[in-house]
Amino acid sequence: MDSVEHRIGDSISTLHPDIIQTQILTRLDGPTLASTATTSSYLQTLCNEQKLWREISTTTWPSINDSRVVQAISSFPSGYRSFFADSYPFTEYTWLSEKQDPPTTGLISSVDLYYRGELIYSKVQEMETENGKAGWFLSAPFRVDLLDEKESVQTRIRYPGGDYEAWVRNMEESMELNWIVIDPIKKRAANISSRKAVSAKRNWLTGDLEIRFSTVVAETAGNKKAAEVSVVVSCGSAETWKEVDEEVGGEVHVRDVRLQVEDIEGKCLKGRDSLVILQGMLEGKRCCKDGGGQRRGKGRYEEYVEMKTHLREKKERREKAQDTICMIFGFSLFVLLWSFILLR
């Protein structure tokens, strides 16, 4: 092995390092660059150049050009290389014990939304999680909204009219989202999004099309508790979908981008519990560095939906049985009392 590495190093070292870095390594994507670094100690030195990893990272996630993210990445052990190693793979879907304290300072969210590979929305937002002035965050239902209530983002997406269901399927297949959570204190980052959408359906109350990106997580303890970390992107017309002629179509705006964490019953978890889950994803193992993670993510979501449906039906059957027992008991009591009255 050492002799092979030595021959590789000798052959590649005949090229000037500037040529290798500017003409060869700059053409590689992140995973390929990381693999190249393992072939020889000489290439490892060249591949660890920060400029390479900064260019790859900012190309992959444009939102990280924000000064707050740049400052946070600068404190990572190996800078942009560490950040990419954390953020590019999918995280293992587990969180730590509920007894662990949540982060003591604000996490940073770095978000990029794409339609057919074109960036349509990008934003960086801090989550205030400190006790004290923002202590309410820990006890209130967890939700991070990137857009204000009356704010919307114009896009070049259009609903052409006609077959609405076909357009919904197209939107689900065409949308991609990266939501990277960064912990500046512990110097870790994790992409908590499923990347590809797992579902798209119309909200009949608002008329918007809601596109869901979901990561299903499970507690490491043996009780097998599950939860869903989801990002919901709502798309509608300049007014509302209720006023759009579905035969004519119209321009599509992004009207809402929100992060929330729900338990298996669909209830929003509070800030403290949600932050424990996010911290577990930050510190968890990484896996599935290719498209297999996206397919696995949707598969887990579909299994999770089936589990939710099964638990809901089981709960309904139990409640129905309890109602039946109460009715029988009440009727029996009524008959007993009525018989007692007649006997008197």
Image: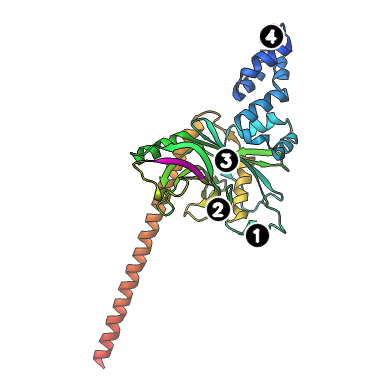
Alpha-carbon span between mark 3 and mark 1: 24 Å
Looking at marks 3 and 4 on the same chain, the residue that comes earlier in the sequence is marked by: 4
Q: Quadrant of residue 185?
A: top right
Q: Position of residue 247 (x, y in %)?
A: 34, 41
Alpha-carbon span between mark 3 and mark 4: 38 Å
Looking at marks 2 and 3 on the same chain, the residue that comes earlier in the sequence is marked by: 2
What residue lies at 58% left-to-right and 56% top-to-bottom? 270
Q: Position of residue 290 (x, y in %)?
A: 53, 28
- Magenta stretch prevailing secondary structure: strand
Task: State the mark number for residue 149.
Answer: 2
Q: Position of residue 234 (x, y in %)?
A: 48, 46
Q: Of discs 2 and 1, which sits in the foreground?
A: 2
**Amino acid, disc 3:** Ile
- Would you name the residue on which mark 3 appears? 192
Whether residue 232 can be seen here: no
Instruction: Indicate whether residue 186 is drawn in magenta.
Output: no
- Would you name the residue on which mark 1 appears? 136
Q: Badges 2 and 3: C-beta atoms under 8 Å apart? A: no
**Amino acid, disc 2:** Glu
Looking at marks 3 and 1 on the same chain, the residue that comes earlier in the sequence is marked by: 1
- Would you name the residue on which mark 4 appears? 12
Q: Badges 2 and 1: C-beta atoms under 8 Å apart? A: no
